[in-house]
Image (cartoon, rainbow, N blue to C red):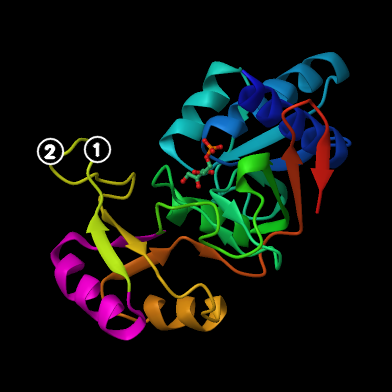
Amino acid sequence: MSLEKAKQVAAYRAVDEFVKGHCVFGVGSGSTVVYAVQRLAERVETENLKVICIPTSFQAKQLIIKYNLTLGELETHPNIDVTIDGADEVDSNMTLIKGGGGCLLQEKIVASCSKKMIVIADYTKDSKKLGDRYKKGIPIEVIPMAYVPIKNKVVAMFGGEIKLRSAIAKAGPVVTDNGNFILDWMFTNQDLDWEKTSNIIKLMPGVVEIGLFVKMCEKAYFGQAEGTVIER
Ligand code: 5RP
């Protein structure tokens, strides 16, 4: 229960701080974002706001529809005022691991079109170094035919271990909203330069996106178990 409360207070705080009037709003993915959409829907209703919502996943699109918000797309609204999204881990430099839910590609596209990207998370995501708290690794979205060579190259270059993500043990691979696979890279070197590492991995043929968000997040709100919020 306290984890849910932590997610809720962070989400409500971020929406109240960053939605001040009519705007184009990027809707992130994951369980914390559900609270942000709830709060946004309340505010749209009570304040009669005009907010165009740009989804970062199928899940986000469904949420926008469920809460009767206005669904938009990048084709018609390529300039987003603010995107509020979750994260799997946030380090002391505001570098993020994202993609625990497999939505990293669209999340990064939408964030890159946003004047501001704000993270909302519970206290378990607040960390000093990547890997201190989140143990599931860094997601890499890949074209299916290339998953083995990419896996081998990343391990040879940077070490660690890589698993092809599957929903249930022995079931087939998880397929993203974009028809790709996800590799989860369990890195062992926590002192890598994440910007360089991300750029090198992104240049490997077949890599579509990596769940490292470097210099993209302007502010993070971490909800605490007792209901307060720490801002960074
Ligand atoms: C999905 C994501 C999510 O934002 C991230 O996994 C955090 O999710 P939650 O709010 O459920 O902890 O990156 O791809």
Q: Quadrant of the N terminus?
A: top right
Q: Position of residue 89 (x, y in %)?
A: 57, 53
Q: Amino acid at mark 2?
A: Ala
Residue receiving disc 1: 167
Locate residue 101 relative to residue 145 in the image: left or right: right
- Mark 1 vs mark 2, CA separation in Å: 7 Å
**Element class at badge 2:** loop
Q: Amino acid at mark 1?
A: Ala
Q: Are marks 1 and 2 in contact (CB under 8 Å)?
A: yes
Q: Position of residue 201 (x, y in %)?
A: 38, 77
Q: Residue at coordinates 24% horizontally, 80% vertically from top-left?
A: 153
Q: Position of residue 29 (x, y in %)?
A: 52, 39
Q: Considering depth in this image, is 28 or 12 the residue closer to the camera?
A: 12
**Element class at badge 1:** loop
Please, what is the dominant secondary structure of the magenta stretch?
helix
Q: Residue at coordinates 62% horizontally, 23% vertically from top-left?
A: 4
Q: Considering depth in this image, is 42 or 187 the residue closer to the camera?
A: 187
Res 178 seen here: yes
Few, some or many residues within 10 Å of mark 2 (<14, 14–19, 20+): few
Specify start and end residues of the magenta stretch as a single range. 138-159
Q: Considering depth in this image, is 5 or 214 the residue closer to the camera?
A: 5
Residue receiving disc 2: 171
Quadrant of the rendered image containing residue 161 = bottom left
Quadrant of the rendered image containing residue 32 = top right
Image vertical order of residue 144 relative to residue 21, above or below: below
Q: Residue at coordinates 40% horizontally, 76% vertically from top-left?
A: 202
Q: Quadrant of the C terminus?
A: bottom right
Q: Is residue 146 magenta?
A: yes
Q: Considering depth in this image, is 10 or 16 the residue closer to the camera?
A: 10
Residue 43: assigned label: none
